[in-house]
Image (cartoon, rainbow, N blue to C red):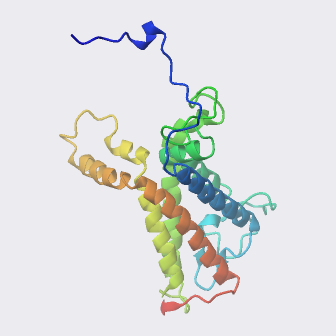
Amino acid sequence: MTATLPPPESSGATRARLPIRTLRTDRWWLGPVLTVAGLTAFLVYGLLRAFQQDHYWVPEYHYLTPFYSPCLSASCEPGSALFGTFPWAFPWFIPYAVISLPLLLAFRFTCYYYRKAYYRAFWQSPTACAVREPHGRYTGETRFPLLGQNLHRYFFYAAFLISLINTYDATNALLHGENGGFGIGIGNIVLFGNVILLWAYTLSCHSCRHVFGGRLKSFGDRPFRYWMWTQISRLNTRHMLFAWITLGTLVITDLYVALVAGGVITDLRIFN
């Protein structure tokens, strides 16, 4: 006859009290450390470039860095404000892309993957599986600044619109070669490569998947929505990969435009 143990609540049992933080022997700390380093490096670079307000536009080829798109200050370089500007020049502490940058930052800040990444890396909640938290209690997303995390579904629409603007920027650059006509240079490849990957990250978002498949009880009479939901679901499995790759391509694209605009390097033309 097998003895049956009483349930924990009746026996007064509690969680095991371990004298050490974890019994894990692998390098569980490496992932959070790399996450902190990667996100911090991107934020520092992005802030410095957003407030530099220089070397963001190459008039010869109409290269515009995504960190300044759309350029909305009256002091934007001639030709760089493809959608018009406000009637005044921005002070140094307001980025030229004053609308798009905060919305894109909010989209990534509330992204399901990034939430997991910085919860573990910065707030250590938890740092890793089977690793004791340093916090005395768990409050979830019930306190500031996490109360607005569910706004992610709305930030998705803003990110979708900004991706369209970035696509327009890249296409516009194709139409302004060295002689004023169609042309392709390394900068065009960099811009389009970045746009394609930004679309991959945006469309692989869980909110995008919900747009096509959410609130439906059956796909039976909606074959197009089912097809779209299926394709987005395939992208969704690589959402984390696209989240990191696009941080890198944003920096590479901005750095390339800055170097060409500053005269440090010359854009290699493939076709003019």
The foreground one among 272 and 247 is 247
Q: Quadrant of residue 76?
A: bottom right
Q: Residue at x 45, y 10 (%)?
A: 9
Name the residue: 24% across, 13% down: 2
Query: From the viewer's perspective, is 157 left or right of 256?
Result: left
Task: Confirm whether residue 85 shows in the render.
Answer: no
Where residue 157 appears, x then y in whole percent?
A: 49, 48
Q: Nearer the viewer, residue 9 or 85?
A: 9
| Most foreground residue, 170 or 18 | 18
Q: Position of residue 83 (x, y in %)?
A: 60, 65
Indicate the quadrant where residue 145 lies.
top right
* Residue 191 spot, x, y in % from top left: 51, 74
Q: Is residue 3 visible?
A: yes
Residue found 42% across the figure and 54% down from its top:
239
Residue 39 picture location, percent across and down: 61, 56
Q: Is residue 37 above or below residue 187?
A: above
Q: Residue at x 29, y 54 (%)?
A: 231
Q: Left or right? Give the position of 96 relative to 268.
A: right
The N terminus lies in quadrant = top left
